[in-house]
Amino acid sequence: MKVLLIAESREGKLLNSCYELMAFAEKMAAETAMFLVGSDSALPQYGGKLYLADVSAAGEYNPDGHKQLILDVVAKEQPDMVVFSHSSYGWDLAPRVAFALQAAQISEVVDVAGSTMVVPVCNAKLRRDVAPKTAKTVVTLQAGAFGLAEVPSAAPVVEKLTSQSGGKIEFTGYEQAESGGVDLGKAKIIVSAGRGIGKPENVAMIADLAKALGGEYGASRPVVDSEWVEHNRQVGTTGQTVAPKLYVACGISGAIQHLAGMKKSEFIVAVNTDKDAPIGDVADVLVVADLKQFVPALTAKIQAL
Amino acid sequence: MKILVCIKQVPDMESKFKVDAGGTWYAKTDLAWRMNEYDEYAVEQAVQLKEQVKDADLTVLCIGSEKVKETMKKALAMGCDRGAHIADEEADKKEPFQIAGIIAEYAKEKNFDLIFTGMQSQDRGSGQVGILVAEMLGMPGITTVVHFAYKDGVIEAKRELEGGVKACVKVAAPAVITCQLGLNTPRYPTLPNIMKAKKKELLSVPAADLLKVESRQDTAKMYFPEKKGGGLVLEGDPAALVDQLIKILKEKTAVLG
Ligand SMILES: Cc1cc2nc3c(=O)[nH]c(=O)nc-3n(C[C@H](O)[C@H](O)[C@H](O)COP(=O)(O)OP(=O)(O)OC[C@H]3O[C@@H](n4cnc5c(N)ncnc54)[C@H](O)[C@@H]3O)c2cc1C
Ligand SMILES: Nc1ncnc2c1ncn2[C@@H]1O[C@H](COP(=O)(O)O)[C@@H](O)[C@H]1O
């Protein structure tokens, strides 16, 4: 078994996720090669062969160009599997590579058993074992599912790739997240509102509980997308990563992208009407209740302490 | 301008799921069904584009059982002009490559200027169909779009990356756009528009007529994950729950002083 690992870099920095790809390869006991569009000055600690395309020529976002580079490496290395992170880079590129290779793609793999891949279904309420039917397979790995490989203090054997410019999509630059406002990263206690709050007026009851506990309030993405709460309070992969002493998730189902932002919290309480909500997997205490009754009652009791 | 938007009907994620008798998918009985959340943004963007360019024809496509027509009617009431129902009682057993193959086959000689899809379906969640359609049709595809603008045949879009950073991209139509949460605010169909939608064209074609590609993967098994963590579950009267939780917070954390 040979796997080609697709590392990523952004704004000149190598992303740590390459060590997750390496952990996956270790678990598969596979021979590896790695591919990176990046630069000489930010190489992974990796003992194997690294195919490096210089980002100044290949561009940070150029799916047509990156696809072609990967296909060239695949032609040379003949891997059985091409492995991406299930990230904005990976889920964009993986289907393009899979289509070109006429290979099965299995997305968001969380575990492996032989050649069978395990993936989540229905907001992680269910799991599915998937078996590819093609000789080559393309997979994307859920962030965090395989841990980080122990970082070897090795330098890769670099083989440089030359890239053709062009491609149909023009990348014109990054737009940074707005900064300023609250810094949830500093809060010791965070109470977060999810879609289960139902309407914008109910943000107040979440903020009240946060205040009674001496903390800050946060929110899941739908609450931010609906503009009920500002973006700098969003917890998750596309918001803040937090690890307070206490995190109270109110009306939040526990999607992986939310969990990624809060699961390192010391103590997690979830308030949810659905006993099977995936947030129950990370919660120390799951209170099965309607938050509209429970939260104000809890706030009142705490204020009276 | 010709626009296509692809939608999927999915169960409400708060449903109580069961594995079906075959053991490879969830049972379809006793579930509440709705439009895939990501696809609501796709439909809204397609309708907004049609409103902007005025001279446009907007088709909504859905592969699925007879039942998916309910969800298609919502898209028609939101402003799509016509519905292309690809009839397939077994659609949930089809893998992304086949779903994309059917869509590409349908779209092949129709010269759509823009095709909108969701970035992923909430149940299967493969996040593949949109880009596969783009590759199959030889069109550029942009994923995870949270901002979309169209002017004189050129699309300016923002892709959302991790940590709230966005990548700004430009591409000339025709193109495929996969829509991320928060792209816009999907409208609620009004009653008059719901009535009007009833008269709109909604034609069914058998999926078999369009399916030209083979499946590349099989689901061996579907099951519930083992409960990890083993956290405490509190149920019962809310007032009593409040006292129980306060007691736990006092014992296990230092937050209540
Ligand atoms: C690329 C990408 C990035 C993302 N980034 C983020 C991110 O950074 N942060 C994030 O949060 N999400 C993110 N998401 C979205 C994520 O996948 C989920 O859609 C989102 O987290 C769901 O939010 P929610 O739990 O509030 O809503 P839902 O999933 O709709 O859950 C609502 C919950 O409320 C419960 N509920 C309903 N009524 C009540 C009541 N009265 N009392 C108590 N409970 C109730 C329900 O049982 C349910 O569990 C991202 C998605 C993608 C694809
Ligand atoms: N059965 C279907 N009918 C029409 N469009 C679909 C279907 N399944 C998936 N799609 C489209 O493809 C997108 C991505 O789905 P997926 O690759 O399954 O995550 C969805 O958001 C829809 O826009």
Image (spheres, coloured by chain):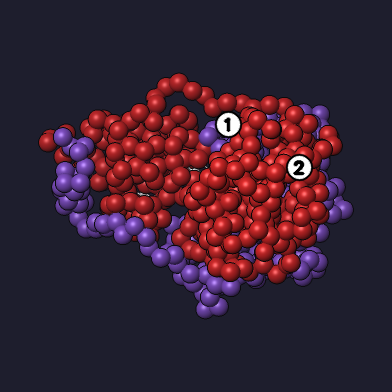
Residue B21: % across, % down: 52, 78
* Chain bearing mark 2: A
Give the chain coloured red: A
Residue hosting label 2: A159
Disc 2 crowd, CA 10 A, few/some/many (<14, 14-19, 20+):
few
Disc 1 crowd, CA 10 A, few/some/many (<14, 14-19, 20+):
some
Residue hosting label 1: B165
Question: Distance from label 2 to label 1 (Cα)?
Answer: 31 Å
Q: Is residue B218 above or below residue B148?
A: below
Whether residue A117 can be seen here = yes
Looking at the picture, which amino acid does disc 1 mark?
A: Val
Quarter occupied by residue A241: top left
* Chain bearing mark 1: B
- Secondary structure of the residue carrying numbered label 1: loop
Looking at the picture, which amino acid does disc 2 mark?
A: Glu
Relative to the observer, which residue lies in front, B69 or B135? Answer: B135
Q: Is residue B22 above or below residue A246?
A: below
Residue B136: % across, % down: 80, 54
